Amino acid sequence: MRTIYICKSLISLSLNNTSHLNKTPISLLSQLFISSSPETPIAVADYLIDRHKFSAETASKVSSAVKYVKRPEKTDSILSFLQESGFADTHLELLIKRMPRVLSANLERSIKPKFKFFQDLGFSSSDVVKMVSSHPRILASSVDNRLGPSILALKSVLGSNMDVPMVLKKCGRLLGHDLAKTVIPNIEFMKSCGISSSQITHHVCNFARLFLRKPTSIREYVKRVDEMGFNRKSKLFIEAIRVISSMTKENWELKLEVFKSLGFSEDDILSVFRTQPQAFRKSERKIRAITQLLLSTGKCDISFVVKNPEFLGYSVENRLKPRLRVVEVLESRNLLLKKPSLANVCKMSNKKFFEKYVLPFSNEVGQLFVVNKPPH
């Protein structure tokens, strides 16, 4: 109808004013062109590189998922809004690589409401940019059916409105999942096990993957930890659950076999797990290398490692070997008034070790220690 109207207007102008016969009304022709010619699709790689100066790497990655930008002007408005909202070029590239379909999203219905939602909650523009660019699935979630209920649920189980923004800043990916089916029941179950709210909040912030597991799996992990004699009142109880969750039963058995092959008894292994569950996250190779290195000094046996399981997390090349070598040289030259404790040698800070065993004997061991581990 609009096209017919413009055509009639052109004819009327021509009949009523012959002076305009050779002067076409530009504005009417422009409207006719716009109304009769839809936007021409552009190859997404050409669009991103030529029109918005994105990198070839980003354009190539996005084009593998989306071939064309069907409505360039609409996509321009999306990118403009994101830039006005604080997205730098690096954020934009990260976002569209992770979620190419954002280029064809509905700005008014799908994107703007999410930004307003987080801003109303008190998030700063930089917080929203960081969260959305890192976890773009947020943009695909409904405010009414997913984001809103999830926020309310997090507030209720974390026990503090202040904790929710902190959790989401660190792990916006939570909002890409149905929290009512995973995170919420898992948090409630852990609370019933006696784990404190502060520990749960810390782990939700830093190890969200644990809480995204099926509730049946979490209950199974807790059962296994209980069977190993772990005290639920221990602050390490939740760490033990996380360690168990991080490996399959087959990998767990392989880890046990490594300890047994080194001379650890079953009681020794359980003792290590109860006092230092993180030791079981170390690779079999590292566990073997550290244990064999300590035993090779002739100053300790397996019981020493059992009593000091944190050593299994130390660096062999940057901490243990240089220190043991320095002490070995000093002892061989009778430069120490008394033999130092192996535990103290391994545990003390770099600064203290340097001041006590390297600086006073710099001519003998200074170069040796600096080459392996410069003091901090």
Image (cartoon, rainbow, N blue to C red):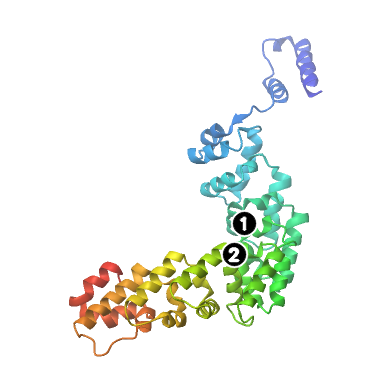
Query: Looking at this rendering, what residue extends furthest in the right direction?
Result: 1
**Three-letter amino acid code at the position of disc 2:** Lys
| Circle 2 residues within 10 Å: few <14, some 14–19, many ≥20 | few
**Residue 218 horizontal side relative to residue 98, left or right:** right
Q: Quadrant of residue 373?
A: bottom left
Q: Quadrant of residue 159?
A: bottom right
State which quarter of the image contains the N terminus: top right
Q: Which residue occupies 24% across, 71% down? A: 368
Vertical placement of residue 314 versus 119, above or below: below
- Residue labelled with disc 2: 249
Of 323 and 104, which appears nearest the observer?
Answer: 323
Q: Quadrant of residue 38?
A: top right
**Three-letter amino acid code at the position of disc 1:** Val
| Circle 1 residues within 10 Å: few <14, some 14–19, many ≥20 | many
Of 160 and 257, which appears nearest the observer?
Answer: 257
Vertical placement of residue 243 versus 37, above or below: below
Of 278 and 52, which appears nearest the observer?
Answer: 278
Which one is closest to the eye, mark 2 or mark 1? Answer: 2
Q: Earlier in the sequence, mark 2 or mark 1?
A: 1
Query: Looking at this rendering, what residue extends furthest in the bottom direction?
Result: 337
Residue at mark 2 to residue at mark 1: CA–CA distance: 39 Å
Could you say where residue 33 lies in the image, as x and y percent from the top left?
Answer: 69, 22
**Residue 313 horizontal side relative to residue 155, left or right:** left
Could you say where residue 321 lies in the image, as x and y percent from the top left?
Answer: 32, 72
Q: Dots 2 and 1: beta carbons under 8 Å?
A: no
Residue 128, numbered label: 1
